[in-house]
Image (spheres, helix red, strand yellow):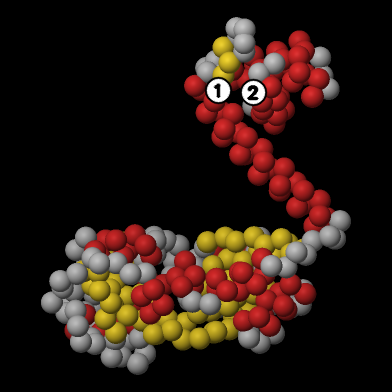
Amino acid sequence: MELRHLRYFREVAGTLNFTRAAERLHIAQPPLSRQIQQLEELLGVPLLERGRPLRLTDAGRYFHEQTGTLLAQLESICQSTRRIGLGERQWFGIGFAPSTLYDGLPELIRELRADAGLELGLQEMTTVQQVEALKSGRIDIGFGRIRIDDAAITQQVLREEPMVAVLPAGHRLLGAPLSLEQLAGEDFVLYPANPRPSYADHVLALFANHGLGIRVSQWTNELQTAIGLVAAGLGVALVPASVQQQHRADIGYVTLTDAEAVSPIILSQRRGDVSAPLQRCLQLIGAKPA
C-alpha cells in the first residue's frame, strides 16, 4: 500500500464521483479506478458500493475517517519539516519521565509552545531512554529521575523532591508519617520494570542503604498502573510527592520521616550543546548552562 492509494481514496470518498475526483487529482479516470480497485484488493474488502449514486461501505467510511486523520498529520509534518529546513522554524525535542509532569514541566511546555518560531516535540521516556535519544539527536533535553554516567551527556539536579508512600484506602498505616523501616514489611508495587536502571532501582537502593529489603508483589512499567494496583490491594508504592496532585478516593498518601527519602528531578543534555532553543529552555527553568 502506498500513499497515493490513500490520497486517491480520500478524493473519491470526498466527492463520491470518480470523474470529479480524477479532475481534482489531475489524472484520467481509468487509472484512478484501477488504483481504488487495487487498494480494495490489498485490504481484502470493498470500500465502495458502485451504484448510482456511488456510496461508501461501512469499511469505506471507517477507512476514510482514519486515513483522513493520518494524511492530515502527515501533511502537517511535511509542512513543519519544510519550515525547519528553510530556517523558518527550529525543532526542539523534550524527553520526560511521566512523574516529572506533576512538577514544573507543564509550565515550561506552555512557554515553549507559545514561541511561533519553535516546533516542539514531546516524547515520554525513562532517563535511560532519554540518554540514548539525546546521543542520537532525537531529543534535545530530558527530564528524568536517575543519575547516569555517560561522557556524552551532562546532568544537573533541578531539585530533590520528597517521596511519599501510596497505600490503598483503609490501610492500617494511613495517617501518621511513616519510616522506611515501617514500610519494609509491606508488599510493594514497583515501577518501571524496564529498562533498567530506573526509578525502581532508586527505591530498592533507598531501603538497601538502611539494611532493609522489600517484597515486590508486582512489577509494572507505568506510574498510573502502579497506583491502580495499589488501589486494588496488591501492595504499597513510593512516588514523588508532586504525584499527590492526583486525587483518588481509593488510595491515600503518607509522608515519610526519613530525610533521604527523596527523588531528584534531573535534567539531561548533550555535552557542549549551546543551541539557542536549549539555552532559552535552561533560562526558563533557571538551570545552569553546561
Residue type at the position of mark 2: Ala
Residue 13, numbered circle? 2
- Give the image location of residue 133, x and y in percent: 61, 63
Quadrant hosting residue 244? bottom left
Mark 2: secondary structure: helix
Contact (CB < 8 A) between labels 2 and 1? yes
Residue type at the position of mark 1: Gly
Mark 1: secondary structure: helix
Tell me what residue is drawn at x 19 percent, y 83 percent. 175
Quadrant the N terminus occupies: top right
- Give the image location of residue 90, x and y in percent: 77, 63
Which of these two is toward me, 139 or 232?
Answer: 232
- Let me know if residue 217 appears in the view: no
Seen in the image, is 46 located left or right of residue 263? right
Farthest-out residue, left = 172
Farthest-out residue, top = 51
Tell me what residue is drawn at x 75 percent, y 46 percent. 78
Quadrant hosting residue 142? bottom right
Tell me what residue is drawn at x 30 percent, y 90 percent. 258
Quadrant the C terminus occupies: bottom right
Residue 60, numbered circle? 1
As measured in the structure, the alpha-carbon distance from the residue carrying label 2 to the one carrying label 1 is 8 Å
Q: Earlier in the sequence, mark 2 or mark 1?
A: 2
| Crowd rating for badge 2 (residues with CA inside 10 Å; few <14, some 14–19, many 20+) | many
